[in-house]
Amino acid sequence: MPNTSKPTYTQSIGRRKGAIARVRVIEGKSPVSVNGKPISEVFTGMIFQKEYQKPFEVTKTMGKYTATVKVAGGGLSSQVDAISLGISRSLAKLSDDHRKTLRTFGLLTRDARVRERRKYGLAHAARAQKSSPKR
């Protein structure tokens, strides 16, 4: 029976607003894939490319590792931020040196800002009715 061992990987989750990205970082040179497609097809534009490549550039592991990502929810920008956080967390699991450099660049910090929920009786999320002054 042939030896078909699965490649070893580190898995982590990145979140931003409504987007959740499940990331697996594997040793290899192939491009990052998102939901089965190359990431350059899903996220076009230089700003998005710089954002998801930042963890690899900071840790100087650009050609060493690749990632497979399943992402759902949110918009394009929040999905890219979630992917970046997931990649950063996976690289931090691989090495303590990576963890230190990612921490100094702020790539391991989860952005906790989320859309405020709509409240009944109010005009929008937080705006209350204007009341006249009582005299």
Image (cartoon, grey):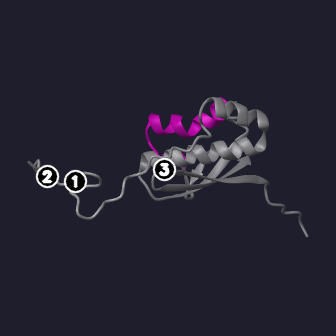
> Is residue 1 placed above or below 49 in the rendered structure?
below
Visible in this render: residue 28? Answer: no
In this rendering, position of residue 72 left or right of residue 91: left
Mark 2 vs mark 3, foreground winner is 2
Q: What residue type is labelled 3?
A: Gln
Q: Which of marks 3 and 1 is nearer the N terminus?
A: 3
Q: What residue type is labelled 1?
A: Ala
Q: Callout 2: few (<14), some (14-19), or many (20+) C-alpha neighbours within 10 Å?
A: few
Residue at the right extreme, as displayed: 1
Residue at left offset 66%, top offset 53%: 12
Task: Tell me residue 63's x, y (percent).
Answer: 70, 36
Q: Which of 96 and 131 is in front in this view?
A: 131
Range shown magenta: 39-58
Which residue in the structure is indicated by mark 3? 79
Residue at left offset 45%, top offset 35%: 47
Which residue in the structure is indicated by mark 2? 131
Mark 3 vs mark 1, foreground winner is 1
In this rendering, position of residue 3 left or right of residue 117: right
Which residue in the structure is indicated by mark 1? 128
Q: Which amino acid does label 2 sit on?
A: Ser
Q: Callout 1: few (<14), some (14-19), or many (20+) C-alpha neighbours within 10 Å?
A: few
Say which element carries label 3. helix
The total number of labels drawn is 3
Residue at the bottom extreme, as displayed: 1
